[in-house]
Amino acid sequence: MDVFVGRLMSSPVRTVTRTTPIQEAATLMLDNGIGSVVVVDNVGHLDGILTATDFVTLAADGQPAEETEVHEYMSTDVITATANDLITDVAETMLDRGFHHVPVVDETEGVVGIITTTDFTAYLSETNLDNDVQ
């Protein structure tokens, strides 16, 4: 059975802009229990992604979070998916690249969600529970 990204993705996605103070992005991530925020432009199209790993780099660089903007540490070479992509294809890409977060985009709507390793874990857990019941 084919399962598509749109079924598993988290939406709405938490977003920030390039000029958001990194401390504000960190607070957003902590308050929502998430490992990344998607960076968007003024019309909601993907500009980059900021992950918990980027905060390790920030700390190692000794940068003051209150004086640093998201664009200084975000990744801009972002692999994306669409809601119609097969989860098997996206999972393979995530494993090959060591990614934990992949923004889900739509050509006209911009960023519509995000698929994470947590989404895959929840899906597999649910699938295994369903199989155990049968």
Image: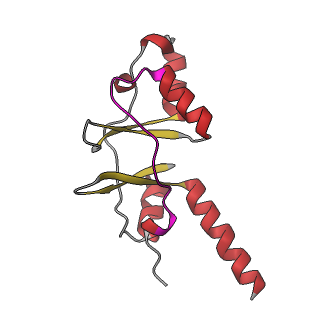
> Looking at the figure, which quarter contains the C terminus?
bottom right
Drawn side of residue 46 relative to residue 24, left or right: left
- Which residue is depicted at the point 36% across and 59% down? 81
User: Could you tell me how many numbered marks the image carries?
Assistant: 0
x%, y% of residue 43?
Answer: 25, 41
Residue 34 falls within the magenta-colored stretch: no
Q: Position of residue 119 (x, y in %)?
A: 57, 59
Residue 11 in magenta?
yes
In the figure, residue 92 lies in which quadrant?
A: bottom left
Q: Is residue 13 left or right of residue 42?
A: right
- Examine the rendering and report whether any part of residue 23 can be seen: yes
**Span shown in magenta:** 7-22
Q: Residue furthest right?
A: 133
- Of residues 32 and 53, the one nearer the viewer is 32
Can residue 63 be spotted in the picture? no
Q: What secondary structure do most residues of the magenta stretch adopt?
A: loop
Q: Eyeballing the image, is 20 above or below 68?
A: below
Image position of 131 with respect to 63: above or below: below
Query: What residue do we see at 39% from left, 24% from top?
Result: 20
Q: Measured from the top left, where is residue 131 in percent x and y?
A: 71, 83
Please give the name of the residue rendered at 56% of the width and 55% of the height, measured from the top-left corner: 117
Rendering coords of residue 32 (x, y %): 59, 39
Task: Judge left or right: residue 127 versus residue 42.
Answer: right
Q: How is the image coloured?
A: secondary structure
Residue lying farthest bottom? 134
